[in-house]
Image (cartoon, rainbow, N blue to C red):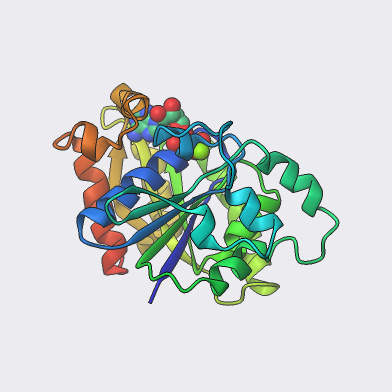
Amino acid sequence: MTRTLVIANQKGGVGKSTSVMNLGVALAERGLRVLLIDLDPQGGLTAAFGIDTYDIRRSAFSLVMHSHISLARVMRPVRERVALVPASIDLAAGEIHLASKPDRALRLRQSLQRSRIPFDYILIDTPPGLGIMNANGLVAADEVFIPVQCQYLAMRGVRALMDTVVRIKNSINPTLRLCGLFGTMYRPESRHAQEVVDELRSVFGPKMFKTLIDYDDIVAEAPVAGLSMLEYMPRHPIAEGYRVLAEEVMRGRLNK
Ligand SMILES: Nc1ncnc2c1ncn2[C@@H]1O[C@H](COP(=O)(O)OP(=O)(O)O)[C@@H](O)[C@H]1O
Ligand SMILES: [Mg+2]
């Protein structure tokens, strides 16, 4: 059975795309077949794999706009056991084209349902905001996985996102559930960061993953080389952090 996770947080720059790439590679290291879908017109995930988002013929845009274009035609292998549906800049136009269509939020779900390609995990990366592409991600997924920056005010965005999740669950996607939240850009020396983590644990209890991904400027270097942290610096604590996080996700069981 495929597990489809949408990585969501309407705040930009919280580590969504970084987490999708590193988790995807970590799951593939464990022998699992992974599909990554980039729904962000900015194409941060696509660019991190060294692919130019201005030079793409078929992308996630084709998938949400044209029901006759199959997943097999838009995805491309990026690693052993990892395939990517890249973003292209015209995804931004997709928002406008789809705005008047009654099934606008169902497009990705429908194209994944039509596909017979076996994957163990599908990870959907979403843009900041709560627009049509975010809705497509939330409707196509079984579970929502939320990275939270370990900083003050992080909670505000999470509450708004949870409201959206409940709305989508009560309308179009009744089986949608919260996979969990995890802290990223964590600075162990910061008292504030610890307070944010404590608050998240007290609000979300077992839904807050035990693994925290540290902050390190080096994370910005890996995508320049077209690599995940697991490949760029395999023994770095952040690479190890994503491996442990992947295990937590795989266990599907959260630590109390
Ligand atoms: N753990 C981390 N430590 C330091 N910088 C990080 C970390 N995770 C991500 N970043 C950097 O923060 C920026 C935003 O990350 P990104 O994954 O693109 O966020 P989002 O997809 O939520 O907008 C990028 O420049 C990325 O390299
Ligand atoms: Mg991103």
User: 229 and 217: which one is in front?
Assistant: 229
Query: In the current view of this chain or complex, which residue is farthest to the right?
Result: 100
> Against 225, is 157 above or below?
below
Q: How many numbered badges does the structure rendering display?
A: 0
Q: How far across and how far down the image is residue 114, in percent?
A: 56, 73
User: 231 and 142: which one is in front?
Assistant: 231
The residue that appears at 26% across and 27% down in the rendered structure is 189
The image quadrant where one finds the N terminus is bottom left
In this rendering, position of residue 71 left or right of residue 24:
right
The residue that appears at 17% across and 37% down in the rendered structure is 234
The image quadrant where one finds the C terminus is bottom left
In this rendering, position of residue 246 left or right of residue 145:
left
Q: How far across and how far down the image is residue 216, in percent?
A: 30, 26
The residue that appears at 34% across and 68% down in the rendered structure is 120
The residue that appears at 62% across and 61% down in the rendered structure is 69
User: 67 and 152: which one is in front?
Assistant: 67
> Against 90, is 80 above or below?
below
Residue 27 image-quadrant placement: bottom left
In this rendering, position of residue 250 left or right of residue 75:
left
Q: How far across and how far down the image is residue 139, in percent?
A: 61, 65
Q: How far across and how far down the image is residue 194, in percent?
A: 33, 38
Q: Is residue 208 visible?
A: yes
